[in-house]
Image (cartoon, rainbow, N blue to C red):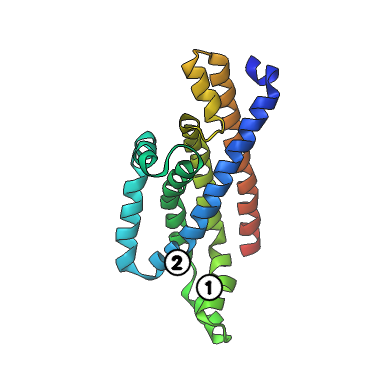
Amino acid sequence: MTFLFRHPGEVALRILQHLELVSIAIAIAFALALPLGALAARNARVRGPLLGALGAVYTLPSLALFGFLVPFTGLGFVTTEIALVAYAQMILVRNVTLGLQGVPGPLRDAALGLGMTPWQSFWRVEVPSALPVIIGGVRLATVATVSIATLAGKIGAGGLGQLLFAGLDNDDPNRIVAGSVAAAVLAIGADLALLGIQRATLARAR
């Protein structure tokens, strides 16, 4: 723990880098997952193969995926983001699918009966109704991404993994503890923040 107190500037920098990696990855992953989840919710033929393929990606060992990508996209930020987005897809697409499937049919019919187009119904009725489940997926994906993003330190993309791997390479347990504690606190903090948002959406839905 001494490293945390002796080098607060470096720890803060790594936390900010980690936040950047995770925030960008989750934003891109969600932008991809929303249309994919909507497609899966509406098309059973697509749903099975899509979720199966994303599940297969999710089961790949993290280091193996990073190692596979490096020859094509190099060391650093781009490789890290591709891997993080790929891993987040399984959780996000599944929850978007489940959330949209859980929207009552009469609610959709009522929206269309009021003159809404299918596009308007999707954004104004279906997504808000599915939002608690969708945010639950964002919570899970964010916590998982905070953990996986520590591997970014191994390929020079920064973040808290930089402390962990520097500690391992130099036999410095203080750096390892500092990186581990900071990553855990970051994951818990992000989860609690999203939990608050999820509860607020549940309260509105009721």
Q: Which one is nearer the viewer's eye here, 109 or 79?
A: 79
Q: Where does label 1 land, which residue?
A: 122
Q: Which one is nearer the viewer's eye here, 67 or 72?
A: 72
Tag 2: Cα neighbours inside 10 Å, few (<14), some, or many (≥20)? many
Q: Quadrant of the C terminus?
A: bottom right
Q: Where does label 2 land, which residue?
A: 38
Question: x, y percentage for residue 164?
Answer: 52, 24
Asked whether, in this view, residue 60 is left or right of residue 145, the answer is left
Name the kind of residue labelled 2 in the image.
Ala
Question: x, y percentage for residue 90?
Answer: 41, 51
**Can residue 206 be seen from the camera position used here?**
no
Element on which disc 2 rests: helix
Asked whether, in this view, residue 56 is left or right of residue 5, the answer is left
Tag 1: Cα neighbours inside 10 Å, few (<14), some, or many (≥20)? some
Assess whether mark 1 and mark 2 are in contact (beta carbons under 8 angstroms): yes
Asked whether, in this view, residue 161 is left or right of residue 87, the answer is right
Which residue shows up at 34% across the image and 36% down it?
Answer: 64
- Compared with residue 196, is residue 121 higher up or lower down, i.e. above or below? below
Q: Which one is nearer the viewer's eye here, 147 or 64?
A: 64
Name the kind of residue labelled 1 in the image.
Phe
Q: Quadrant of the N terminus?
A: top right
